[in-house]
Image: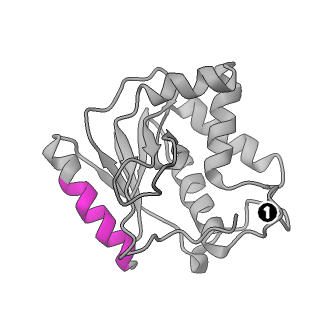
């Protein structure tokens, strides 16, 4: 199963998801849309620190992105590939056992020039029910001081037992998607560094 987090009432989300869905269909993948959370539909289960570890406060959009993934994890019953509306595939998805990453950033020409490709955690990951439960449990166990991408990345890294360089190498080779950015359109995520 592949589930895409998208926002039906957001023009940027719809723009990117149309482009990406066309490519997923071309590769013969069926995508199920999961309606994302907006600042107006935030839950109250997660506790956010007054500031992230970077020293910046969370934006309402960052909190909504957190809840979009968190609520999706709660629905995982079978192994699931999770993508965001701007996750663009360039080859077939890799196989995983319990969890894994398959999206990178940047890749397209319009993305940040000169930046080394790295794992884009929230853009493309695979989880089974057990891993989804761990993501939920660890999110509820503490006050959040990082964006959801950091939570997913650090959780998978702990579960893998690999050191940073080995971890990056393992999942960069599995890359089959990238997060697209078109600056004339903008992004739907508003981040504080």
Question: What secondary structure predominates along the stretch shown in magenta?
Answer: helix
Question: Can you give x and y, in whole percent of width and height, for residue 59 in the image?
Answer: 68, 73
Q: Give the range drawn in magenta.
A: 11-22
The image quadrant where one finds the C terminus is bottom right
Q: Is residue 19 shown in magenta?
A: yes
Whether 113 is drawn above or below 121: the answer is below
Residue 142 horizontal side relative to residue 69, left or right: right
Instruction: Say whether residue 98 is visible.
Output: no
Q: In which quarter of the image is residue 39?
A: bottom right
Residue 67 horizontal side relative to residue 50, left or right: left
Disc 1 is placed on an element classified as loop
Report the residue marked by disc 1. Answer: 48
In this view, the residue in front, 133 or 88, is: 88
The image quadrant where one finds the N terminus is top left
Residue 109 horizontal side relative to residue 55, left or right: left
Tell me which residue sits at (54%, 44%) in the image: 121
Instruction: Say whether residue 14 is visible.
Output: yes
Question: Can you give x and y, in whole percent of width and height, for residue 98 in the image?
Answer: 52, 24
Question: Can you give x and y, in whole percent of width and height, for residue 95 in the image?
Answer: 37, 23
């Amino acid at each position: 199963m592949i589930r895409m987090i998208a926002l039906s009432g957001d023009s940027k989300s719809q723009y990117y998801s149309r482009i990406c869905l066309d490519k997923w269909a071309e590769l013969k993948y069926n995508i199920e849309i999961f309606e994302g959370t907006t600042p107006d539909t935030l839950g109250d289960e997660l506790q956010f620190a007054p500031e992230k570890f970077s020293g910046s406060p969370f934006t309402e959009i960052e909190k909504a992105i957190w809840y979009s993934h968190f609520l999706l994890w709660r629905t995982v019953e079978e192994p699931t590939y999770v993508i965001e509306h701007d996750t663009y595939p360039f080859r077939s998805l890799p196989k995983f056992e319990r969890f894994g990453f398959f999206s990178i950033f940047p890749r397209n020409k319009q993305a940040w020039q000169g930046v080394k490709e790295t794992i884009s955690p929230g853009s493309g990951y695979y989880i089974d029910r057990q891993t989804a439960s761990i993501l939920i449990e660890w999110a509820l166990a503490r006050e959040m001081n990082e964006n959801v991408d950091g939570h997913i990345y650090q959780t998978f890294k702990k579960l893998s037992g690999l050191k940073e360089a080995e971890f990056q190498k393992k999942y960069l080779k599995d890359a089959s998607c990238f997060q697209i950015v078109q600056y004339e359109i903008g992004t739907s995520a508003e981040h504080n560094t």
